[in-house]
Amino acid sequence: MTERLPFRAAESNAARSAPPAPPSPTAGNEASGQSAPLTVSRLASLIGTSLRSAFPGALRVAGEISGLRERTHWFFDLKDAEAAVNCVMFATQARRAGFTPRDGMAVVVTARVDYYARSGRISLVCEKMEPVGAGALDLKLRQLVEELRALGWLDPARKRPLPTFPRRVAVVTSRTGAALQDVLITMKRRCPAVGVLVVDTRVQGDGAAAEVVAAINTVSRLHAALGVDALIVTRGGGSAEDLWAFNERIVAEAIVHCSIPVVAAIGHEVDTTVAELVADERCATPTQAAMRLAPDSDALLRQVGVVARRLGAAATQLPIARRRHLGQIAAELDGAGRKALHRDAARLAALLPRLERNRPVELHARLRARTNELASALTRALHLRIQPERIDDAARRLERAAATVVRDRAAIVEARERQLGAVSPMRVMERGFSVTLRTDGKVVRTVADAPPGEEVETRVVDGAFRSVVQGQRPIAPGSDPAPRPARRRAAPDDAPGLFA
Amino acid sequence: MPEPSFEEALEQLEAIIERIEQGKVGLEVALAEYERGVALVRRCRDILTSAEQRVEELSRKMVEKAERRADEEE
């Protein structure tokens, strides 16, 4: 009996941690029943302690979820064929699980064993929960999808438009698969002109994802040299495990980083793989993928026919079209020049058929050129009338012109100012000239202005002096060798006008 | 100049027709453009009516050749 280790350990733990020391549940006590009985809480405490010491760390327990009550915390039983254990997962941990459990789901929980004394129940307090089997794959897939969504890889705005007429389409698939045959048949039927480059890869099993990635990367890197404008990743239907390679993150990454648009068609219509979610275009089947990329030859031929007719019409109706054009211009014109322009236009229009008939090539070309000139002149004239931006432009030019005028005026004033400085009497006086005034303030210009005895005042540069005229000596004009002051202004930097 | 792809041919064709229709080019230029347009229509029809499908499988040799060409272009 002494070898029942858990209880031994519990006993010693309890003895240490629960003062005052209770009566020990010894073998003697149990056998005789003579000692004081244990209280229920004491027993509960002993059970709790022994459980904790028997399961000191966290355990990993596999089982099936049953009786799930999901409030903020998760309460459920974990069971297998023979047993069940009560479990709780608190909200903080539950949020981190990354999925919501359902009854019947197989999971592995990481938990510690706990004994809840109040109800006498043993529970697993779960810290982690992971699904197993199909559930695990499912969770992994959903977590990957969420991650890629967060990266923006599923964003429709990221997806590139497909080329309307690819030169060549690369098909990443198994050489032997039915998917490739579907693609080839459809492409040939719709548009044989589009080349097909088959890139053989395994499409299921270990290593398939890596091969698909290598194929996509090679085409992406060399697409220009290979002349490939778009890529199809495809395989036929199969089990979830068969399609798994196309749920791998590396495949999604290769598709997203591919330098040309990618169309993905994996499995049947009901299957959705990560590859399809991130591809630029998702198609339900390989045939649809081929349809999506191969243009419809018949429709395009009809389109070319329409274009060809337009070309022919444009060429044959060229002179007629031009005549109509001139007539239109004339009709649209109004105002002063209208009648004259109209007459010209009408004459030109009338001239055109004759131009077409008359065959001197040079004349024809010259007249044609003249016609063009006049036509564009008319067009210009018309535009001048009707384009509001022309008015804006004119207004701006007017403003600029006005500004220039003001600037020019300012320059003139400045020049005049300089000239004025040069002609200032003070400047002249600096050079030795003087002005003589009579007492009445009149400037003495001639000898007659200052008869002898007249008192005069002579102003020089730094002042004035008074004197009385003592005599006169008239000079005959032209005979005097002394330079007349007026002559001095011949020098260009001299003051103009003062002695004029 | 390599032969234009279908899309390029169609694009050039549209541009030619527009120029002729708008009458912005002289008659001589228009006629030259018309000739070019006719050739482009032929090119488009040839592409669409070719019955032969060119299917190749990507081989190591092709990859090496493409790599050399890609290197030269760089």
Image: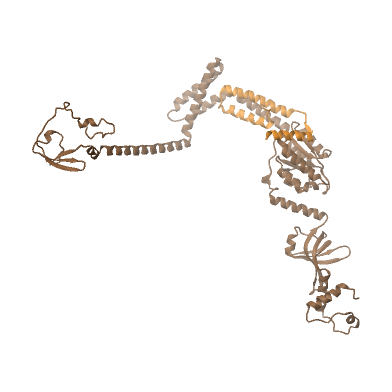
Chain colours: A brown, B orange
Residue A409, image x and y in percent?
34, 38
- Tell me the quadrant of the picture where the C terminus of chain B can be found: top right
Does residue A460 appear to the left or right of A64 in the view shown? left
Indicate left or right for B19 with A249 as reference. left
Q: Position of residue A191 (x, y in %)?
A: 75, 32
Q: Is residue A140 above or below residue A387?
A: below
Seen from this angle, which residue lies furthest top? A360
Direction from residue A363 to residue A316 in the image, left or right? right
Is there any visible trace of residue A272 in the rendered image?
Answer: no
- Is residue A262 in view from this perspective? yes
Q: Position of residue A485 (x, y in %)?
A: 21, 32
Image quadrant containing the N terminus of chain B = top right
Residue A313 position in % (x across, y down): 62, 25
What count of labels does the image hold?
Answer: 0
Q: Foreground: A27 or A394?
A: A27
Residue placed most toward the observer, A431 or A451: A431
What residue is at 86 percent from the left and 75 percent from the top? A8
The answer to which image quadrant residue B38 occupies is top right
Q: A304 left or right of A407?
A: right
Q: Residue furthest left?
A: A453
Q: Quadrant of residue A262?
A: top right
Q: Nearer the viewer, residue A117 or A387?
A: A117
